[in-house]
Image: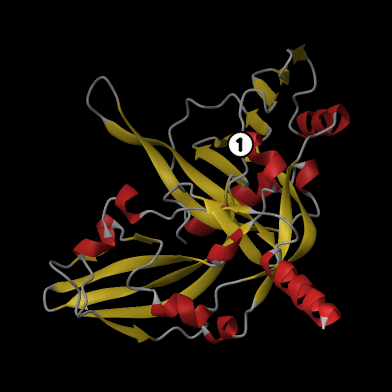
Amino acid sequence: MKRIAAIILLAITLLLCGCSNHRVRRIRLNGSALRETYSECIGESTTVRNMSDDSSDFYRLTQLPVYEIIPRQLTPEEFREFAEAFGAAEGVYDTEWDYTYATNGVAAVYMGKSLDYAGYEIRLSCGTDNVPYVPVSDERLEEIAWEVFNRIPFLKGLDYEYVGQVGERAVTSPSGFKFIECVRVKFRRLVDGIPVNGNDMCQMYINGAGVYEVDMYVYDYKKSGMMDVVPYKTALENVREPDGMVIPAEQKHMKGKADTMTVESTKLFYMNQYYDDFEDEGMILQPYYSLKGTLSNSTGSAEFYSLIIAIPNKYTYKEKLYTDEDCC
């Protein structure tokens, strides 16, 4: 009897520690921090329809690997190779926290964690930041970005996807002439095919001369166990009251609360919210669902992203905000 009780106690202990002994600093996807709160658009009478063709892939999901987040620290040799790839291999300037290679206006900068708690920032400036952006097709914009991305030595062998244009910088000249100075495009890391949002990023700024600045935070991920996840069916049941919701203002053409909430597609993401002060507490990649669809009533429609944290409450112990680029 004592042996049976011990086995049961061990099973309970393993269940509660199913995250490979890593507590999770729970993210808080807070709709009130966004331009629109879902309570303004969704009511108790709003009917949910699931039309997502790819949602069936998530019904079978019960567990995911636990990945510890390790900020990637380049060796001096790796950083010099990066600088040389873009013609900036002279004029070394070192401080206690960072070092720079600069040649003929091209600068490669490496900044240590003492300056930024999220990790090690790696930046490339090409010295062509005064050339106004000349509009090109989406296909050509992607080609320009990949041409530069593929020249970055320390990213070879890592899995990334091109997200596309995520912003632009508009400028008004002293004479009142308005123009687009540059656009910002983004690459996103993939881990086991799942996109990673948050701190892990590679962004490029493109103007009329091409890519003139690259900004990166790179991480390694160490598999250290398995973790239960919230079933997709549960996430779908909570789509009206999610952990957070994004309703893009430019896609809102509706007044009042929606009669119907139609889920059209579902994606699973990881969130990297590494922060240096918490590194001893088991910072891991944190999964969440993003359910995209349309709200509608007699006045019109609106696009929405309903965000559901996929980590069960038993693993979590503190909340943290996210950024509003992490919806899709």
Q: Is residue 226 visible?
A: yes
Q: Is residue 162 left or right of residue 113?
A: left
Three-letter code for the amino acid on which mark 1 is drawn: Val
Residue at disc 1, secondary structure: strand
Identity of the residue drawn at 74% across and 14% down:
96
Apparent side of residue 164 relative to residue 83 in the rendered image (left or right): left
Image point 31% across, 68% down: which residue?
303
Q: How is the image coloured?
A: secondary structure
Instruction: Indicate the quadrant where residue 210 lies.
Output: top right
Provide residue 245's location: percent of width, then percent of height: 36, 61
Foreground: 52 or 80? Answer: 52
The x and y percentages for residue 262 are: 33, 80
Q: Rate crowding at label 1 as few (under 14), some (14 to 19) or many (20 or more) other CA atoms within 10 Å.
A: many
Q: Give the residue drawn at x 44%, y 83%.
A: 52
Left or right of 37 on screen, residue 105: right
Q: Quadrant of the N terminus?
A: bottom right
Task: Using the image, determine if residue 152 lies above or below residue 117.
Answer: below
Q: Nearer the viewer, residue 110 or 32?
A: 32
- Residue assigned mark 1: 214
Say above or below: 93 vs 227.
above
Please, which residue is most extreme toward the right here? 77
Q: Nearer the viewer, residue 23 or 89?
A: 23
Locate residue 248 relative to residue 144 in the image: left or right: left
Query: Hey, which quadrant is residue 238 in on the image?
Result: bottom left
Q: How many badges with numbers are in the image?
A: 1
With respect to residue 194, does 177 lie above or below? above
Q: Position of residue 198 (x, y in %)?
A: 55, 49
Q: Is residue 135 visible?
A: no
Q: Is residue 261 above or below residue 307?
A: below
The one of 207 and 25 positioned closer to us in this rendering: 25
Residue 187: percent from left, percent from top:
60, 51
